[in-house]
Image (spheres, coloured by chain):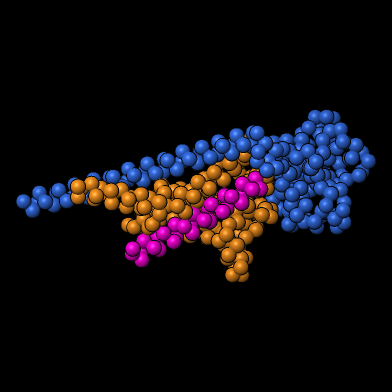
Chain colours: A blue, B orange
Amino acid sequence: MQTNQKASQRNSHNNSEHRVAKQILKELLTVCIWIVVGALTLWGADGFGLLYSSSPSIPYNVSSQVDFPGVYQIWQSNDAVFVDTRSSASFRQGHIPGAINVPINRVVQYLDRLPTDKETRLITYCGSIACPNAFQLMNVLLGKGYVNVRFFPRGLRDWHAMGYPIETE
Amino acid sequence: MTPLSLLITGIRIILGFILLLSGVAKLTDISAFLTNVNAYQILPIGLVKPMSFLLVSAEITIGSALCIGYFSRGAAILSAFLFFIFAVVLVNVLWRDLPIADCGCSNFLFSFLDVLGLSISGIPNWKMVFADVVLSVTSIGVVCSSQQGYGLESLIRNLQDRKDNITDCW
């Protein structure tokens, strides 16, 4: 008799736990669905340009970029300092002539290589258009007080592909 | 009304507000948030926007659910997961020594800790990781607590029970 009572108590306890777990899972799935619905709404709002200043997105903000042929003309006229964001090893293998190397992961150590005049025109670049480091460094330099910084999104690969000179060390 | 229920309700609402306000702040300056996500260099550029939207939506949805106390256990599990992900991302950034000026992760708790002189906001630091881990563990505590506190869910349940009782009497 007692064994039966214990078994029945255990069963009811297990059922109750099972019910709670099921309820939590249901809640979890419902919240997940709402999150996805919210994200899709934001995506739609962005597509219609309803989100504040999200279009065009900052990484491709035209005013902060410099592209061909302007970049070559700037280099020819020696009008700006080019800043290579790649590693020192890659820099030694080849870079835009006259560029200085400030690897993105060692900005603090290499910052003293940059001109002290904060008004100097700086152009950051990286290996290729797929690399976000030029944009990152541009933001870091703007944060450090340099007022005239832009980035060259196409990078060294396209510079080389255009037949422009490369300097090696 | 037990002290534990009140405590759980308080914690749940604070967690909810942290997430909700943080999500709304990101939504009002979405391009700055996209820049911050991009600066972490974890996601490929094509995924920055979709993941940012998912994160903003998650913060607002989970925050609202925790604040009003509806689907709160499910929301608390996701909140624990979210804070854990934040902590992992911050550890990754600190490990790689990335030059990030603004973590894009500030919330009113961090602002409050700043006022107390702990200077936790801005550049990613280990204090942020610790705070995120604490918030993640607190969320787990809300899920595992035997009491679920007060909110819309308990209100609906009480009304339902009362209705059942009246029906039983008749």
Whether B11 is among the magenta residues is: yes
Counting from the top left corner in percent of width and height, residue A141 is at 77, 52
Image quadrant in which you'd find residue B4: bottom left
Residue A125 in the figure: left or right of residue B40: right
Whether B161 is among the magenta residues is: no
**Highlighted range, magenta:** B1-30
Residue at image x 44%, y 60%? B11
Above or below residue A164? Residue A146 is below
Residue at image x 60%, y 56%? B106
Q: Outermost residue toward the right? A: A77
Counting from the top left corner in percent of width and height, residue A84 is at 78, 45
- Specify the quadrant that holds the C terminus of chain A: top right
Residue A137 in the figure: left or right of residue B134: right
Residue at image x 62%, y 36%? A45
Q: Outermost residue toward the front? A: B170
Q: Outermost residue toward the top? A: A162
**Foreground pick, A26 / A82:** A26
Q: Outermost residue toward the left? A: A1
Question: Which SS type dominates the magenta stretch?
Answer: helix
Residue A45 in the figure: left or right of residue B7: right
**Foreground pick, B38 / B153:** B153
> Could one spot residue B170 in this view of the protein?
yes
Counting from the top left corner in percent of width and height, residue A46 is at 64, 37
Residue at image x 63%, y 54%? B103
**Foreground pick, A7 / A78:** A7
